[in-house]
Image (cartoon, helix red, strand yellow):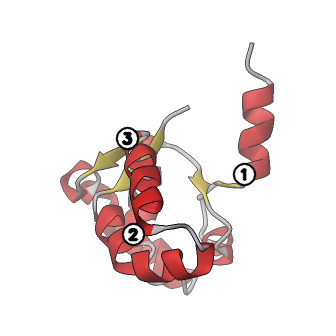
Amino acid sequence: MDFVAPAFIQDEFRRHLPKIIALSGIAPPILSALSEDLFDLIRIVSREGYVDCLAKARALVEEADARGDEDFVALATVLDAPIWTYDKDFRRIKGIRVISREDIERMVSDLP
């Protein structure tokens, strides 16, 4: 199982870091180490890797009133992969498969 995300996800994470620290109660040095470990497990893809699908993704996102999600949709389209999220907006986007933590747990438990 591969985890993949658009390159801007790291900047977005850093921008929300103060809120994450406040809500989690985790000390900043520990959260920093955890986030480094997390990003080591995620393959980061630049926009150039899915730019050819961006126009189609924008149209699908606008049709579903899920603006701002086009990079994730374009990347999922290029990879023919599901999106792991609890954001209900993605469930309205035609042709996008959404999975949850529970789905991933089932997939992992089915591995040999």
- Comes first in the chain, label 2 or label 3: 2
Identify residue type, mark 2.
Phe
Q: Estimate how packed mark 2 is, as few (under 14), some (14 to 19) or many (20 or more) residues with alpha carbons within 10 Å.
A: few
Residue drawn where x is 29% and y is 49% of the image: 45
Q: Nearer the viewer, mark 2 or mark 1?
A: 2
Q: Residues under labels 2 and 1: Cα distance?
A: 19 Å
Residue 41 position by quadrant: top left
Q: What amino acid is at disc 3?
A: Asp
Give whichever of 7, 29 is nearer the camera.
Answer: 29
Residue 13's tag is 2
Q: Which mark is on residue 101?
A: 1
Please tell me the numbered disc located at residue 40: 3
Residue depicted at x 64% and y 73%: 87
- CB contact under 8 Å: marks 2 and 1: no
Please say if the residues under marks 1 and 3 sit with CB atoms less than 8 Å apart: no
Residue, x 37% and y 66% (percent of image)? Answer: 71
User: Residue 43 at x, y = what percent?
Assistant: 36, 42
- Whole-Å distance between the Cαs marked 1 and 3? 19 Å
The picture places residue 72, in percent across and down from the top left corner, at 44, 62
Quarter occupied by the N terminus: top right
Instruction: Check contact, mark 2 vs mark 3: CB within 8 A.
Output: no
